[in-house]
Image: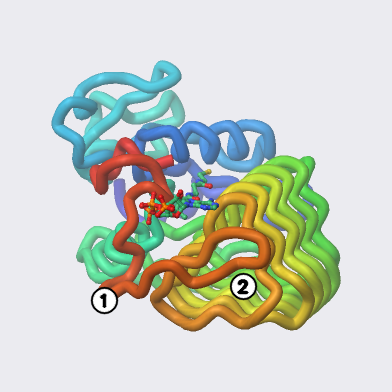
Amino acid sequence: MNYMAKMASVELSLDGSINMNVAIMGAGGHAKVVYDAILSAEQHEVIGFVDDNVDLIGTKLYGLPIVGNIADLDSPALLDPENRGVEGYIIAIGNNTVRQEKVAFYSQSPLTTTPLPPFIKGDGVRGLSHRYVPITVIHPRAVIAPTAQIDEGSVVFANVVVNPEARIGKHVILYTACTIDHECDIADYAYISPGCNVGGQVKIETGAFLGIGAVVLPRITVGAWSIIGAGAVVTKDIPAHVTAVGVPAKVIKQHLTPCPSPKAFGEGREVGGLG
Ligand SMILES: CC(C)(COP(=O)(O)OP(=O)(O)OC[C@H]1O[C@@H](n2cnc3c(N)ncnc32)[C@H](O)[C@@H]1OP(=O)(O)O)[C@@H](O)C(=O)NCCC(=O)NCCS
């Protein structure tokens, strides 16, 4: 489909944001939650899933195709009834390192770097220099302060609270019922698990991971790519590239590479199996 035809098909929702046909990159457990949030928000339409797990390619999830490449969703056999093809995408991979690798891949791919006409720029959608636009997913039952900022590619699930002046970076995951208090800075590729409570003015640096139910006291910094165990209470700054667990949280491991522990995200590094 040519660009003008594609652009002519883009519709604006009542709040001025753009409705798009989207591909979900990943078809594992995390992708299911992302799908559910998109469905609940009733803004975008999911066309299918993209995964590099050969066991999943060619199968279906929730009645939608799982393909190996985003371009396969534009194939005539899979086009939606309005024939619009894919317009946006969300990377639904839990592992912070793998998510970062996929962002790098898709932001350099010729499939995602063809310029779009400027007129589709609008609220809630950023980075529109790509043919497929990265979307941001916010569950309608998340509570987001108007002064908070959430950047492209991030997902915010049900019962999350983001308080005033918090800044949520790109491709961040805010899992079910976590709370991010005032003036927090949650950097790109961070992952905040279900039920975490993050106090005011906390900094969670790039790629850091908080396990289920972790608590971070106000004004603490959690260093880049560090892993905080489930149930930990972080009372002091945590350096980059470590694992810390317990109450109060103590460093138990130092990492040579980002996010070495598949246990933080579920077993294995394969795209489809990350939770
Ligand atoms: C922190 C975590 C990543 C550690 O994984 P790991 O690096 O493979 O570490 P190990 O399992 O080898 O555990 C190392 C030690 O820490 C202890 N430990 C592990 N996780 C712990 C936790 N959350 N709290 C307290 N102690 C913990 C282990 O019992 C072990 O202690 P030992 O040496 O005395 O036997 C993991 O246990 C964890 O908490 N994951 C969170 C998962 C999660 O919340 N996922 C969210 C998906 S939505």
Residue at far top of view: 63
Give residue 67's position: percent from left, percent from top: 24, 33
* Secondary-structure class at tag 2: strand
| Res. 256 mark | 1
| Res. 141 mark | none
Position of 260 compared to 127: left or right?
left
Residue type at tag 1: Leu
Frontmost residue, 48 versus 56: 56
Residue contact at pointers 1 and 2, CB within 8 angstroms? no
Residue type at tag 2: Ile
Give residue 42's position: percent from left, percent from top: 67, 35
Q: Is residue 267 visible?
A: yes
Nearer to us: label 1 or label 2 = 1
Which residue is located at x 31 percent, y 37 percent? 272
Q: Label 1 to label 2, Cα distance in Å?
A: 22 Å
Which residue is located at x 57 percent, y 72 percent? 169
Position of 148 compared to 273: left or right?
right
Say which residue label 2 marks: 186
Position of 211 compared to 89: left or right?
right
Which residue is located at x 45 percent, y 30 percent? 82
